[in-house]
Image: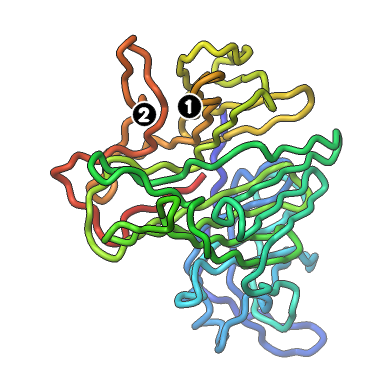
Amino acid sequence: MRKAIAVWLVVVVSAVLAAAARAQEAKAIVIVRNAPAHGIAMAKVDLSQTLKRLGAKPFSPASLQAQLPDGRKLPIQFVPESENEPAKGWLLLKLPKGGNWTVWLRVGRGARDEGRGEQNGTVRTKHFTVVHDAKRMGGLPSRIVFAETGKTFDTFVWNDRVHHRNLGSFHLRNDSNPKVQIASQGEIATVVRVRGRYCQPDGKQPPSQPEATYDWVYFHDLPLVFVTFMAKQREAFAWHELHFLELNLPDTSFSEWAGGEPLRQGKFEASQKSFGFPDWGALIDGRNAIAFLRSGQALFHDGLGGYGIVAIAVRAMGRMDGVLFNPKGVQLRDGSFLPTYDWVAEPAHSVSPTASRRTK
């Protein structure tokens, strides 16, 4: 049975008597339960009240420090969600190992974590290299190189988009001027933030001007990428479809698939059929793999020779701000389902200006 990771931030601040300096130092307490074996814990937090009690004005993410009750210092990283709310975001800790831990959080001095402003991002970890090029794919990853085998994967496209039956589709990859930023680079991860507009190939946007912000969290020592997503638009408009992390392959760069649970696996054979998995799904090429993990549901479509191979990360979250979720997608005439819908909205419903937030 999978155990959920839990992180609590205790806002009550303690006063600790330092033995050497005989001075008081303010700290907050972070309680971690069921940390994974690799020791990296990540949680969405609001540090506003904590920082106020710690007397941190102004606040810099690099000033956060973490240590165990026995004095051992821990790698820590904080990724603000936005410049407007710098105290809200993701807290990352690297613990000695898995299990339950109590961590002391302080505000000190330091410059471990500095974003680098707008630029193209090439991120190298122990396991892969990923390229974010503002001139390609709307700033979303356009090239992946696997470190162990040397395999280069760059024949794919991202079909992340909004779609309306009358207006058609508007893709993020069509934005010719996305913003690509190294939002955070610390001891645990590098975070690439991509802001883009949903456009048609000629750059045209719909009247509601929808856009999205993606955070790609690349862990230095793990073969994992954590992706968060937020979409919004200038004015209310009900879209029929909103697609997130839809990877389309025109070839057999990854010729096999696997997913679960329970475990199923096979090969792409141009069956033109769709299938899904409740927990995870993976595209496989020998020792190389790209997988959607803990996404709620992963959907594949074997469209070789036609639409191409499609892999979509889907999380069944029900109704959100007037948007309905359809885990099956659209039903074709032969009775099969094509997994082209992450979200399906009924035309009668209106989507609020800040339409949606998804985490993968």
Q: Secondary structure at mark 1?
A: strand
Question: Percent position (x, y) of residue 282?
Answer: 62, 27
Residue 234 falls left or right of residue 5: left
Front one among 41 and 19 = 41
Describe the element under mark 2 as helix, strand or loop.
Answer: loop
Judge by depth and name the residue closer to the eye, 277 or 95. Answer: 277
Instruction: State the count of labels.
Output: 2
Residue at the (31%, 20%) spot, across then down: 331
Instruction: Report which residue position mark 1 lands on.
Output: 299
Which residue corresponds to the image point at 35% horizontal and 27% vertical from the top-left? 329
- Cβ–Cβ below 8 Å for labels 2 and 1? yes
Q: Of residues 94 and 123, which is closer to you in this image?
A: 123
Residue underneath mark 2: 327
In the displayed structure, would residue 296 be above or below residue 204?
Answer: above
Q: CA distance from mark 2 to mark 1?
A: 9 Å
Query: Which image quadrant is residue 26 in?
Result: bottom right
User: In the displayed structure, does residue 194 sit left or right of residue 347?
Assistant: right
Q: Earlier in the sequence, mark 2 or mark 1?
A: 1
* Residue 308 in view of the camera: yes
Direction left: furthest residue: 348
Percent position (x, y) of residue 85? 46, 75
Residue type beneath disc 2: Pro
